[in-house]
Image (tube, rainbow, N blue to C red):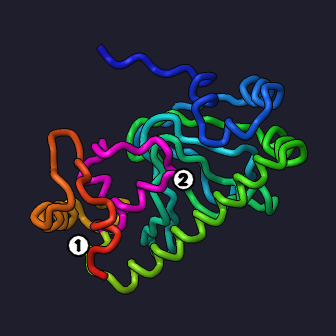
Amino acid sequence: MPAEKTPLKDVLHQTIWSKYLTPEQMERVVADTTEQFVPKGGYVCRKGETVDAWLGVIEGLVKMNNLSPEGKSVTFTGLSAGGWFGEGTLLKHETRKYDVTALRDSRIARMPARTFNWLLDTSLPFTRFLLMQLNERLGQFIGMVEFDRLLDVDARVARCLASLFNSHLYPGTERLLQISQEEIGYLSGASRQRANQALQVLEREGLLKVDYGGIRILDIEGLRRFGA
């Protein structure tokens, strides 16, 4: 039997940012936030659309990416369970600058923009949390630009896996990553075959172990330093 799904209310109370809210603020968040199911390959949100919600991944795995006019796909980051995103676009009142697609069946939480902005107006601790979120995301993107331009595929796969272990951006990530080699390829900009080769290299280095149904991470800091 499939595992019973955690109710949205419980998920919201388990988020890293919920501890910054008062009971009254949390009550409104629970009342206003809705859930969306996105099947594998489906769009969570699309480039150019009006942004009307702050989004969180309840279950599943999604990627933030864009297509060039020539059809080349550029992946910015992967977002696993516990990750929330889109605050920058909400703050700037812009249309969305990227697509977000599901790499597997995913449950997405949607906090309406009006609720998000109300929290900014009424909760200084929540605002501070968002400042940290934006800073962590900026650091992640700077690192991704660096390793995309300077590192080979083995090192890109290593850094890609390490990037999923950010306690602020992805608080729910466990040492056994439920992620396929195809998904790793999507996130690191490599083919499935080349991602598999990279995993074999990293396994020989003692940084991870390829287990049935996922990747067991043995040395996160080693992955972060690999190829440096």
Query: Picture coordinates of residue 32 (x, y %)?
Result: 76, 28
Q: Nearer the viewer, residue 177 or 196?
A: 177
Residue 106 to residue 152: above or below? above
Quarter of the figure that contains the C terminus: bottom left
Separation of residues labelled 2 and 1 (CA atoms): 24 Å
Find out whether residue 80 is within the magenta segment.
no
Residue that carries the numbered disc 1 in the rendered image: 154
Residue at (36, 43) in percent of width and height: 174
Disc 2 crowd, CA 10 A, few/some/many (<14, 14-19, 20+): many
Type of amino acid under label 2:
Leu
Horizontally, residue 156 falls left or right of residue 165, namely left
Find out whether residue 170 is within the magenta segment.
yes
Q: Residue furthest bottom?
A: 150
Q: Nearer the viewer, residue 65 or 90?
A: 90
Residue at (59, 61) in percent of width and height: 98
Q: Which residues are magenta?
A: 157-184
Query: Picture coordinates of residue 216 (x, y %)?
Result: 23, 48
Q: Mark 2, mark 1: which one is toward the viewer? A: 2
Residue that carries the numbered disc 2 in the rendered image: 169
Residue 146 to residue 122: above or below? below
Query: Picture coordinates of residue 183 (x, y %)?
Result: 32, 53
Type of amino acid under label 1:
Asp
Query: Picture coordinates of residue 58 (x, y %)?
Result: 52, 35
